[in-house]
Image (tube, rainbow, N blue to C red):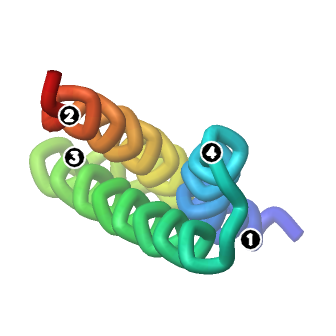
């Protein structure tokens, strides 16, 4: 069972941003939910790129459990950057 932990934690890089986005959504229309799931997928992609960059620059981060935790951290950072960007782009 321990060999599945990194995969499960990496999947949390999608589910955590998805749940945060869905909980904070003003409405629950199917089109809104689909849009939010796409955004969560992009956050996962950002997390994967964050983890890959850190593993490239600092090779001891290449351990499976640590790299999957970096994916989740990167996905949450991507979500934070998305929220920050959306607050900046709103006109006054």
Is residue 89 left or right of 25 when viewed as pictured? left
Residue 53 is situated, as x and y percent measured from the top left of the image, at: 17, 54
Q: Residues within 10 Å of mark 1 (few under 14, many from 20)?
A: few
The residue tagged 1 is: 3
Q: Is residue 63 above or below residue 45?
A: above
Q: Quadrant of the C terminus?
A: top left
> Would you say residue 16 is visible in this rendering?
no
Q: Residues within 10 Å of mark 3 (few under 14, many from 20)?
A: some
Q: Earlier in the sequence, mark 4 or mark 3?
A: 4
Distance from the alpha carbon under mark 4 to that under mark 1: 39 Å
Residue in view at x 56 percent, y 68 percent: 32
Q: Nearer the viewer, mark 4 or mark 3?
A: 4
Q: Is residue 90 above or below residue 23?
A: above
> Would you say residue 6 is visible in this rendering?
yes
Distance from the alpha carbon under mark 3 to that under mark 1: 22 Å
Distance from the alpha carbon under mark 4 to that under mark 2: 16 Å
Distance from the alpha carbon under mark 4 to that under mark 3: 35 Å
What number is the disc on residue 78?
Answer: none
The residue tagged 3 is: 54
Judged from the image, the secondary structure of the residue bearing numbered disc 3 is helix
Query: Mark 4–mark 1 contact, CB under 8 Å?
Result: no
The residue tagged 4 is: 26
Residue in view at x 11 percent, y 46 percent: 57
Q: Residues within 10 Å of mark 4 (few under 14, many from 20)?
A: few
Residue in view at x 18 percent, y 43 percent: 58
The residue tagged 2 is: 90
Distance from the alpha carbon under mark 3 to that under mark 2: 32 Å
Q: Quadrant of the N terminus?
A: bottom right
Is residue 82 left or right of 72 when viewed as pictured? left
The residue closer to the viewer here, 81 or 92, is 92
């Amino acid at each position: 069972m321990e060999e599945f932990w990194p995969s499960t934690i990496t999947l949390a890089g999608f589910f955590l941003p998805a749940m945060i986005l869905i909980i904070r959504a003003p409405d629950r229309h199917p089109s809104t939910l689909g849009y939010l799931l796409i955004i969560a997928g992009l956050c996962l992609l950002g997390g994967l790129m964050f983890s890959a960059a850190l593993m490239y620059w600092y090779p001891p981060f290449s351990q499976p459990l640590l790299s999957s935790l970096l994916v989740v951290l990167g996905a949450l950072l991507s979500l934070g950057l998305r929220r920050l960007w959306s607050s900046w782009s709103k006109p006054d």
